[in-house]
Image (spheres, grey):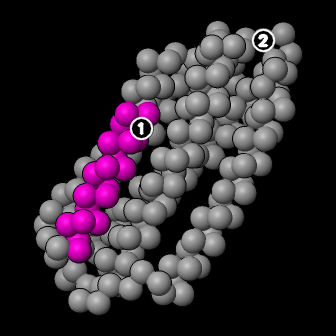
Amino acid sequence: MKYIEDSKTTLGFWIYLMTDCVLFASLFATFAVLRNNTFGGPGGNELFSLPFVLLETLILLISSFVCGLAVVSARKQQKDRVIRLLVATVVLGLMFIGLEINEFRELAAEGNDWQRSAFLSSFFTLVGTHGLHICLGLLWASFLIVRLSTSKLTGTTVKRLFLFSLFWHFLDIVWIFIFTIVYLMGALS
């Protein structure tokens, strides 16, 4: 099996990831400008629970590690192991999304939804955009699982898995910035 990392597809995907960097950089800049505009409502130090967010972070980081193991297994032609590792990645990703939805639901139930203040609007937009990307990644991983379950582990499938892993690791990096800038700095301010 020939594995091509320098193809036009891979280059195009890197370009896509860079456009996502610009998107998230814009959302982070917006959040930084609006973080103190609470309109008399609560700020991050009153809303965020660091142990809860740390749990979310650990789940997402473990899912990224498991995804990396899937790529290593694919290069070794261990199709069944790749499927199991992708399933574990999806389960961990679903756990992360479940926790994020729960956090949004609890904030909204307390009257702290995206309409309350510019701070909360920028918070929900930034964190929600990341969550949307996670959901898209979960769909992509699910399609890979179905594809692997019904066909051989080909060079094309390995390349798709590699591109998925780039996307998933990118989302981890974005989350580390969210954890640090939004939650950690918000809780400590």
Mark 2 crowd level (few <14, some 14–19, many ≥20, 10 Å Cα): few
What residue do we see at 62% from left, 69% from top? Answer: 16
Residue 114: x %, y % from top left: 73, 29
Label 1: state its secondary structure: helix
Can residue 123 be found in the magenta stretch?
no
Q: Main secondary structure of the magenta part?
A: helix
112 or 40, which is in the foreground?
40
Start-end of magenta stretch: 57-75
Residue 149: x %, y % from top left: 20, 72
Label 2: state its secondary structure: loop
Which residue occupies the extreme front position in the image? 6
Can residue 59 be found in the magenta stretch?
yes
Which is more N-terminal, label 2 or label 1? 2
Tag 1: residue type?
Phe
Q: Is residue 27 above or below residue 68?
A: above
Tag 2: residue type?
Gly
Residue named by callout 2: 41
What residue do we see at 50% from left, 79% from top? Answer: 10
Residue 96: x %, y % from top left: 42, 38
- The label shown at residue 23 is none
Q: Is residue 96 left or right of residue 72?
A: right
Q: Is residue 68 visible in this depiction of the protein?
A: yes
Q: Is residue 105 visible in this depiction of the protein?
A: no
Residue 78: name its quadrant.
bottom left
Residue named by callout 1: 96
